[in-house]
Amino acid sequence: MTNQILQDLRKELKENIDEHTKNTAQKFFKEKIKVYGIKTAIVSKISKSHYNKIKDIDKKEIFGFCEDLFASGFMEESFIACNWSYNLNKIYEEKDFLIFEKWLEKYIDNWATCDTLCNHTIGAFVVMFPSYIKELKKWAKSDNRWIKRASSVTLIIPARKGKFLKDIFEIADILIKDQDDLVQKGYGWMLKSASESHQKEVFDYIIKNKKIMPRTALRYAIEKMPEKLRKKAMEK
């Protein structure tokens, strides 16, 4: 059954390869990526139609499909794995964290897949089980750029809703001098999201730290603030 489900899925993916998409995908990434070359909307449609065929089976088995999809290395298959795992968010259990962490450590090798997994699957998990935010703080100290980025982008959606501000600042403190631009963009994005509900607190944090915060992170963080505040933040 497992083989047939994935065979059918991959057959449909291959039937929808778009040469222009395939030829231009790499320009958005510094690292080498592996793609079929399929438009995002079509990947989403294929993901949904095939999930409907398996949605009533055991969560553990669906997570097994996700693992196989991640292991292929194809970005489109990784996106489908992210979608399928997120679809199960109402029945997450604490033990699932170890599965999500393993996927992050073993399979994530680009910003797009990192953000998709973290914004949705892992983000939903930490909203359900906030005590696991302490694990994100451990991730922030990792030597792996994707795990460090994950520590911040996991909180993007909760941040927009005003959640976890204290933890957001603690993660930003850990990452604040990081020299990796993708890590800088990640925590800058987290701060920007937090500013939607806590503009004053985030602005005060930026002013306090702007002498040590890389300009890339700072620019991301202030992006949604009024022009007057943006100008003040950028003053040297």
Image: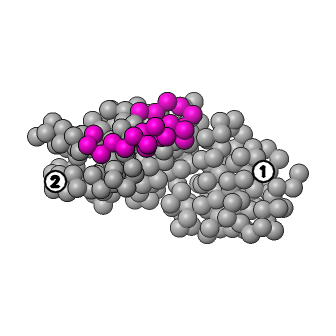
Q: Which mark is residue 236?
A: none
Q: Position of residue 1 (x, y in %)?
A: 10, 40
Category of crowding for the residue at label 1, using alpha-carbon neighbours closer than 10 angstroms: few (below 14), some (14–19), many (at least 20)? some
Q: Position of residue 184 (x, y in %)?
A: 65, 44
Q: Which mark is residue 53?
A: 2
The reply, left or right, for residue 112 in relation to residue 220 is: left
The reply, left or right, for residue 8 in relation to residue 224 is: left
Residue type at mark 1 is: Asn
Category of crowding for the residue at label 2, using alpha-carbon neighbours closer than 10 angstroms: few (below 14), some (14–19), many (at least 20)? few
Precedes in sequence: disc 2 or disc 1 = 2
Residue type at mark 2 is: Lys
User: Residue 133 versus residue 77: which sits nearer the camera?
Assistant: 77
Magenta stretch encompasses residue 32: yes
Q: Which mark is residue 209?
A: 1
> Which residue is found at the position 33% from the left and 53% from the top?
42
The reply, left or right, for residue 56 in relation to residue 103 is: left
Q: Which residues are magenta?
A: 14-34
